[in-house]
Image (cartoon, rainbow, N blue to C red):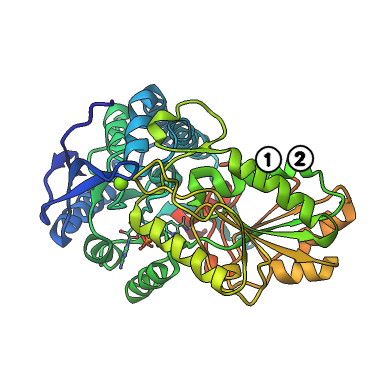
Amino acid sequence: MTEINEFWQNYIDGEWVDGGAGRIAVTNPATGEVLAEHALADATDIDHAVQAARQVHLSGELRDLHPVDRSRILRAMGRHLLDHADEIAPVLTLEQGKPLWESRVEVHGAARYFEYFANQAEAVEGRSIPLGGRYFDFTVHEPHGVSAQIIPWNFPLELAARSLAPALAMGNACVVKSAELTPLSSAWLGRAAEAAGLPTGALNILCGYGREAGAALAGHPDVNQIVFTGSVPTGVSVAKAAALNIVPCVLELGGKSAAIVHEDADLDAFVDDVRWGIFLNAGQVCSAMSRVIVHESCHDELVDRIAEMAESLSVGPGIDRAEFGANMGAMVGELQRDRVELMVTEAISDGANLATGGRRPKDHIGAFYQPTMLTEVTQEMKIARTEIFGPVLSVLGFRDDDEAIEIANATQYGLVGGVFTSDLDRATAAAKRLRAGQVFVNEWYAGGVETPFGGWGKSGYGREKGREALLNYVQTKNIAIRRR
Ligand code: NAI
Ligand code: MG
């Protein structure tokens, strides 16, 4: 059993401190037992953190560095995470539920954001604009100042790194509000900042309740830019808070993403994609493949194969699942498991067929749920339109290409989408017509930190990952000089 500190603190202005709102118990969802306590921030703590970030910003300590110096700091932060992967991964698994090998992948993913955006730190340049003989005109990109980042519990380390790395690369000082269910692993971001020599106060990390600390951060008048990942209703309240202060925000709000499977698809490869698409992190992934839209000619065969794969996954405590393989851990907590269970029950009463799963495994007491597949799902059902955020695949059938696209585009979301076919024309036509920020052809999750990611519709706005992400963290200033 991994030894875990009994009490974890917030990180404000370079100090590890207690919280004004007391402490929160962090539980291990695989057992229901309390793992540790974490300091809980109140609005005053948030204000201290924002003021610390603002002071660093105004001092120029971060903003005025040569970009290569910020690049080196970020690179060292990524290195620190990699060097401590063996310590971080078990803590992440114990607080979040995912298999230990998935936690290791997450630590590497977080480090990768620091590497990638370290490389980009030097690559953002302005342009020179001709205005005739008497003028010399050019643009510069300047950081907003204080970037507020509200992080969810599904990939607590990786999603914090996703916004932190580009924000720091562009010279913003950051205040991170970690998720109350999974605050522990974020401590290594603070330690990485210390080890790398990031200016004190340029990174602050606080755990607190969303409605208290989260809302205080989103509405703080000295915050200059906001990044939020989470549910649509919370996204709406963050966007309202941003609007009141007239600050830009990036919203990443999940989806109900669909894979279209044609009769000429490679079904073996596709079943493997389903394994990652909906059962990685027990389906608690914003870009999960939560719908499969399959041609009627191969529907039954595909359903049989997916059921076989789903039933082959061994479900149990993530900490015992160190090796990459056919396994799944606990969900983040009982509330999330119960939410998913209720949606499955409703889908069945709406007429969906439970093809596999749909139960809590008998041999474990924690927040476990079996890999589940619902078939005979129709577009009218709530399950076909609402994000589930659990290990539950909905299968719908189609007869022709137009119908497939129509079903895929029929939700209010539009985060990602996929098309599986060996026909290039069909693939490119679908890629153009899918209403989503990212389209996968013949491989779900193809891409990486280098490829822009973000949604249409209720999936949110702004782009993360890739060079596009840098634009969230700068504003353009035009400087025009007139010669006498
Ligand atoms: P949530 O959106 O309430 O929580 C996400 C983060 O927002 C947490 O750090 C939370 O403390 C914070 N927060 C909550 N209320 C806030 C407020 N008023 N102001 C500022 N920050 C606030 O999501 P929740 O309740 O944990 O999960 C509900 C559903 O949201 C899930 O079932 C899933 O459908 C979706 N979700 C989507 C995610 C994604 O990656 N797109 C991640 C997490 C949840
Ligand atoms: Mg927990």
106 with respect to 245 (left or right): right
Ligand 1 within 8 Å of disc 1? The answer is no
Figure label count: 2
SS at badge 1: helix
Image height of 83 relative to 399, above or below? above
Q: Disc 1 marks which residue?
A: 272
Q: Looking at the image, which is closer to me, 322 or 252?
A: 322
Residue 16: image quadrant is top left
The residue drawn where x is 87% and y is 50% is 264
Q: Where does residue 279 sit, x and y in percent of width and height?
A: 55, 46
Residue 319 seen in this snapshot:
yes
Q: Where does residue 88 sit, x and y in percent of width and height?
A: 34, 30
At label 1, counting other C-alpha atoms closer than 10 Å, the crowd grade (few under 14, some 14-19, many 20 or more) is some
137 with respect to 366 (left or right): right
The N terminus is located in which quarter? Answer: top left
Q: Disc 2 marks which residue?
A: 268
Image height of 63 relative to 428, above or below? above
User: Separation of disc 2 and disc 1 at Cα?
Assistant: 7 Å
At label 2, counting other C-alpha atoms closer than 10 Å, the crowd grade (few under 14, some 14-19, many 20 or more) is few
The residue drawn where x is 49% and y is 47% is 282
Residue 51: image quadrant is bottom left
Residue 446 seen in this snapshot:
no
What numbered label is drawn on residue 17? none
176 with respect to 122 (left or right): left
Contact, mark 2 vs mark 1 (Cβ under 8 Å): yes
SS at badge 2: helix
Ligand 1 within 8 Å of disc 2? The answer is no
Q: Where does residue 410 sit, x and y in percent of width and height?
A: 66, 73
Q: Where does residue 161 sit, x and y in percent of width and height?
A: 42, 42
Three-letter residue code for mark 2:
Asp
Three-letter residue code for mark 1:
Asp
